[in-house]
Amino acid sequence: MGFSFYSVIEAALLCINAVAILNEQRLLSRFGESGNQYTTGYADEFHQTGGAKQQLLTLIRSVRTVMRVPLIAFNIVTILFLVLFG
Amino acid sequence: MRRPNHHSDQERPVEPNVRPNSSQNAFFTPQTAFYGQPNDPALEMERLTSNPFLRVGMKAVEDGMKDITGKTFNALPDEMKKSVSSIRYYFAVDQAYVRKKLILILFPFRSRKWSLDYSADEPVPPRVDTNAPDYYIPLMSAMTYVLIASIVLGTQKRFTPEQLGTHASSVLIWNMIEIGLLSLIFYICNIHSKLRLLDLIAYCGYKYVGMIVVLSSYLITHSLLAYYCSLLYTGISISFFLINCLRLQILPDTSGSQAYNVNRNRRRVYLLLLVTFSQPVFIWCLTRHLIVT
């Protein structure tokens, strides 16, 4: 119940780490998608049911691309804090 | 809102000194920001401004403040300027609106008209339209919830001053988690609706009113039955209120081509129900630990 800001930051960092270490091939073979990730979503008005998976994969891929380098920095800082201050 | 001694308003640097957007001038002119009647304060003002030293001093302070706030406001990048003025829209409330909105939240069963008014393609500020979302009520009710939770803990002799901070931070964090999850779900399900993120924050903040009602009913009667009854009633009324408010925002309004949109409609309905029924669950979760059988 008593959340501190630190626990939220830690949880967010762990989640983003989990997203960053995903193996794309295994994930895709699990979802059953093969190569149609690059079809654009311009047909949004008509077909929506597959859209959720597309959006999720796009989100995962963009998070990985954006957060790859800052994540290294965050991880190093967090490890230093935990080692020094317990 | 209405302060009887206007000399303290002269030293407050905030609203009337920052120029608002021109499109919102009609609602935010300094004349409308002040609601005070010039009868009594005029006497004090005369007494004050007749003293020349005080007058010089106050003018210097006022100019300095105007300078600082103007400079900080202009130094912000354009995006933040826009978001500051769009957040200011949500604080344009007055007492009649707050009263009507509170009654609407706690007893929404009589209202017939839930659509928002628009003027010149922009939603009308909350002072004019009762159905518009605002940030004043969620903010104030969140703070009141923290205080009432501390009072409840005090009556159970478990209060320490750090509980205030604990509750405040948990309110903030649960709010952020909820808004984050909801925005994520909106994005993943690819639902584009009229509901902006800022509106969603406002609508998710109305549950604190329910929390206050639940907690105060427990505080007054100290009975579990009163707690559960008020929880039930508050859950029903907030769900009803939110369903009606969000129905016009999330669900598509005109039925263009029904054949294609069936799946999307269903997803929107599910999302609407999720948003609405997660509110009473939140109320229950956030007040559960304060209740002692």
Image: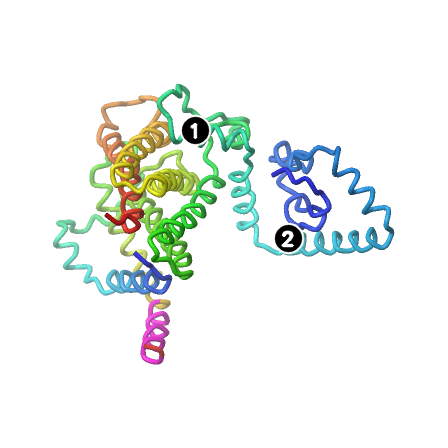
Q: Quadrant of residue B182?
A: top left
What residue sits 33% from the left and 41% below the top?
B218
> Which residue is farthest bottom?
A84
In this rendering, the answer to whether B250 lies above or below B46 is above
Q: Where is residue B114 in the image (x, y as percent from the top left)?
A: 41, 24
Left-right relation of A30 to A3:
left
Left-right relation of B167 to B35:
left
Helix, strand or loop at label 2? It is helix
Q: Which of A79 and B175 is in front in this view?
A: B175
Q: In which quarter of the image is residue B170?
A: bottom left
Task: Name the amino acid, label 1.
Answer: Ile
Q: Is residue A34 magenta?
A: no
Q: Does the magenta stretch include residue A76?
A: yes
Q: Which chain carries label 1?
A: B
Q: Name the residue under label 2.
A: B74
Nearest to the eye among marks 2 and 1: give it.
1
In this rendering, the answer to whether A5 lies above or below B82 is below
Q: Give the main secondary structure, helix, strand or loop, of the magenta stretch.
A: helix
Q: Magenta stretch? A: A71-84
In this rendering, the answer to whether A57 lies above or below B284 is below
Name the mark on residue B103.
Answer: 1
Q: Where is residue B113 in the image (x, y as percent from the top left)?
A: 41, 20
Left-right relation of A25 to B290:
left
What residue sits 24% from the left and 46% below the top?
A54
Q: Nearer the viewer, residue A39 or B182?
A: B182
Q: Nearer the viewer, residue A39 or B63?
A: B63
Mark 2 vs mark 1, CA separation in Å = 39 Å
Between disc 2 and disc 1, whose residue precedes? 2
Q: Mark 2 lies on which chain?
A: B
What residue sits 22% from the left and 31% below the top?
B263
